Structure formats: C-alpha cells, structure tokens
Amino acid sequence: MGALVFFSDFDDFGTWKQALQSHLPTLRVLHWKEVDDPKSIDFALVWKPPEGFFREMTQIKLIVNLGAGVDTLVSRTDLPEGVPITRISDPQMARMMAGFVLFATLRHAREIPFFEQAQRSGQWAYRHPRNLEDIRVAVLGLGELGSRAANELQRQGLTVLGWSRNLRKIEGIQCYAGIETLDTVLSQADIVVVMLALTPKTRGLLNRERLLRLPQGAAFINVARGALVDQAALTELLDSGHIGSATLDAFEHEPLPKDDPLWRMPNVLITPHLASVAIPASAARQIAENLVRVANGETLASQIDPALGY
C-alpha cells in the first residue's frame, strides 16, 4: 500500500495509526520523526506542517489535511507540483461544529453572559427571555459546516441569514452572496457566526469598519480562523460595548498570548480552537478510501482547489 507520514502537534499519532491500519493493514504509518528517507513517502496526513516539510517528498501522491480548513497548505513553496490535496469531510465533524455553534448562539440569545456576570457579583438579576424568532443570526460561510450549522439554528426557531461567496439556496434561510451584500447582512445581525474559509480574499474581511456595521450590543462568534478578523478592532469594540459579547475559538496567534486583553474580558468566552476536530474512528474510513482511489487513479473525495483556497 505504501507509506504515510503523520504530522500534528495536537493529535495523537498512535490513535490515528491504529484507525488507519484498521482499514488498510498493509499501510505503513510513520510519525514524521521516524522518516529516514522522504523520497519513500507516498502519502501525508498533516495539520499545520512547517515550511519545507514536503520539499524532499518527491514521490508523494496525496496530501490529506487533518481538518476542514486548508489555509496552511495552499500558497506554499514546498509542495510538489500537481499533488492533490484533500480535506477531511466527516459527518461527525459537521455534527460537532453544528453543536458548538448552537451552544454558542443560544448562550448569547438567552443572554447567559449577563447572568454569569450577575452570579459573580452575587446579584439576582432577572431578564425576560426574548422570542427566538426575533433574534437574527448571520452565518458567514455556507459550506459543508456552515450550512449544517445554519440549518440547526433555523430548526431552533432563530431567524437565520446566510452569506457566502456564491448564492446558496437553503430552505428557511435568507441567503445573500457577494461582497456588496455583506454590510447589509452585518447591519441586520443580532448575532454573527463566522464560518468562512481563510483565503486571500477573506483575510482581514471583518475589519473595524465592517465590525462597526453590527448593531449596538450584537454578539460575535468566530469558529473559523482568527485572520479573518481585525482582532485589535474586535477587542476595542468589545471593550466599548459596541459588540456586547463574544465566543472566540480562533485567534490571530494561537495559542492566544497570555498577556492578550481578551483573556480578562468578562464578556468573552475563549475556547482553544476545538469547535470541530477530526475524530480518528470516523474520519479514517474516508482517508483510507481516498488513498485507495489515488493509488487506482480514481477521482478523489473532498479534493480542494488551491487557487480558491478551499
């Protein structure tokens, strides 16, 4: 079957090796530190490999990104020309992401940050719950994960607006497309959920000017990439109260530096980029199937277009 190299600073090598070999017993799965001859590597399963990682892997046939976002694999200088890149498209990941987005959105919709602050100061502070249909949630990015999350929010009775690069049609969701409509969507959002892929066109998309389009007191949720957002502007607007609260799972620099003011903001919930992660037991089957496909010269599942960045 050949040899696969594994690289990730966050995932357990042994678990992934066992999961992959349960489908492909003859596949050699090597930790990157075990590789003596890069030219012997046929496949790679990686998450954020350093620059130069692929330079000597001249016989590599497929690179599998250990997650949905592939921004760290496009526009590199060390990728062998023409080698396909696939991302993991796992129903368990989509379910996990939808669940996290639902949790974060309902937390803001039910004003739980307000009650958390009241608890810390020993106050019995009552606020009557709002009608969920009156709360407008803008989901930015309607790909596989974004559309799943948008559907889940709509199912709960929230009014959902969706925005994407190309127009999508999703039943029960008001869909918008194109940069010319983004300000319109933001200006209507009581809660905004960022689920966009990071590409050259989306990097820095949510700058200070666009964040100011949000209504006073709106909530902000980012489960995508930190580089989509002007983090300094976001911090300033959270401090001033223009953005009322935030749930942040992605940041400009990860881990978030200990001296970053976001850590100390009572209206911010920070999680360490875990809204959705690949589960070896369920994702290994898709990876194994793609390894067989590339070996047989067949069409790959979930192949990305490096020119688009997703």
Image (tube, rainbow, N blue to C red):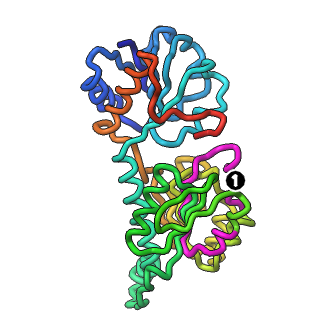
What kind of element bears circle 1? loop
Q: Amino acid at mark 1?
A: Gly
Q: Percent x, y for residue 105?
A: 45, 69
Q: Nearer the viewer, residue 48 or 123?
A: 48
Q: Percent x, y for residue 271?
A: 45, 57
On whether residue 252 falls in the magenta region, the answer is no
The C terminus sits in image quarter? top right
Using the rendered view, name the quadrant where residue 89 is placed.
Answer: top left
x 28%, y 30%: residue: 19
Mark 1: give few (<14), some (14-19) or many (20+) Cα within 10 Å.
some
| Horizontal side, residue 288 vs residue 182: left or right | left
Indicate whether 17 appears above or below 138.
above
What residue range appears in magenta?
184-207
Q: Is residue 194 visible?
A: yes
Q: Main secondary structure of the magenta part?
A: loop
Indicate whether 203 appears above or below 219.
above
Q: Percent x, y for residue 203?
A: 68, 49
x 45%, y 35%: residue: 66
Q: Nearer the viewer, residue 183 or 110?
A: 183
Instruction: Find disc 1 in the rendering and name its residue.
Output: 204
Q: Percent x, y for residue 40?
A: 46, 9
